[in-house]
Amino acid sequence: STFQSIIRKWKEYGTTASLPRHGCLPKLTAQARTALLREAAKRPMVTLEQQRSTAQFATSHLGANMWKKVLWSDETKAELFGLNAKRYVWWKTNTERHPEYTIPTFKHGGGSIMLWVCFSSAGKGKLVRVDGKMDGAKCRAILEENLLEAAKDLRLGRRFTFQQDNKPKQTARATIEWFRTKHIHVLEWPSQNPDLNPIEKL
């Protein structure tokens, strides 16, 4: 019984605590195990139809030379202070509050700005600050002021292809009409596939 086992352990070893067991000893400390923990990656919910559309898009453009003439674009939020992500540090016991192991924080997050960015195989393009809400009118104003100039700076010529996401402000009728009047070819982009855009990795 459990009671008899405790008595026997006391008589043999003079203790009731757990004794060392056979097998390899743990190589990682509790702190090391904590440092190795990672958050689960987020991924968009993709339907079977969207998966097929993505596969068809990828295979139809496989090895195409047109990628050299693609101007990639996206919008992103930039934190004015700190990073919009977790950061990990190695610190010794009782030093976790030392300045070199801490991150300054600000009330209400310290603020952030929205940016419109673009690049091509020839290099980086425009980096534009978005003032106010990014709606359809603001989107067209940014394109009007920056898109053709960025393509010119990157020497893409007039027959380049522009890539953008399928957000409502970018696929609005007025925005599509703007592309038509400017004779700009827009790459047909499968929905729910931000990972296909190389700008997401920058």
Image (spheres, rainbow, N blue to C red):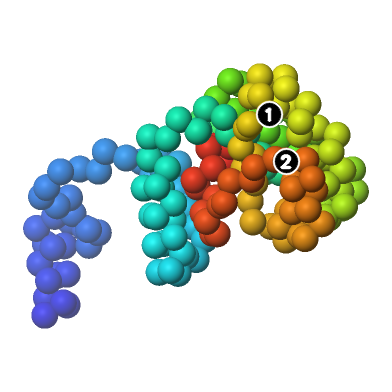
Q: Nearer the viewer, residue 167 or 179?
A: 179
Left or right placement of residue 61 versus residue 121 in this view: left
Q: What percent of the width, then of the height, locates residue 26?
A: 25, 43
Mark with earlier residue (2, 1): 1
Image quadrant containing the C terminus = top right
Q: Nearer the viewer, residue 134 or 58?
A: 58
Secondary structure state at the residue bearing disc 1: loop
**Up-down relation of residue 107 to residue 115 (above or below):** below
The image's mark for residue 122 is: none
**Up-down relation of residue 39 to residue 183 (above or below):** below
Secondary structure state at the residue bearing disc 2: loop
Q: What percent of the width, then of the height, locates residue 134?
A: 83, 51
- The residue depicted at 17 percent of the width and 69 percent of the height is 6
- The residue depicted at 17 percent of the width and 50 percent of the height is 20
Give the quadrant of residue 61. top left
User: Marks 2/1: CA distance?
Assistant: 9 Å
Left or right placement of residue 172 versus residue 1 in this view: right
Q: Nearer the viewer, residue 22 or 11?
A: 22
Left or right placement of residue 125 versus residue 110 in this view: left
Instruction: Single out the residue that lies furthest toward the bottom.
Output: 1
| Residue 78 seen by the camera | no
Amino acid type at image mark 2: His
- The residue depicted at 12 percent of the width and 71 percent of the height is 5
Q: Estimate how packed mark 1 is, as few (under 14), some (14 to 19) or many (20 or more) residues with alpha carbons within 10 Å.
A: few
**Up-down relation of residue 166 to residue 143 (above or below):** below
- The residue depicted at 73 percent of the width and 22 percent of the height is 152
Q: Which residue is mark 1?
A: 158
Q: Which residue is mark 2?
A: 183
Amino acid type at image mark 1: Arg
| Residue 117 seen by the camera | yes
Disc 2 and disc 1 in contact, CB within 8 angstroms: yes
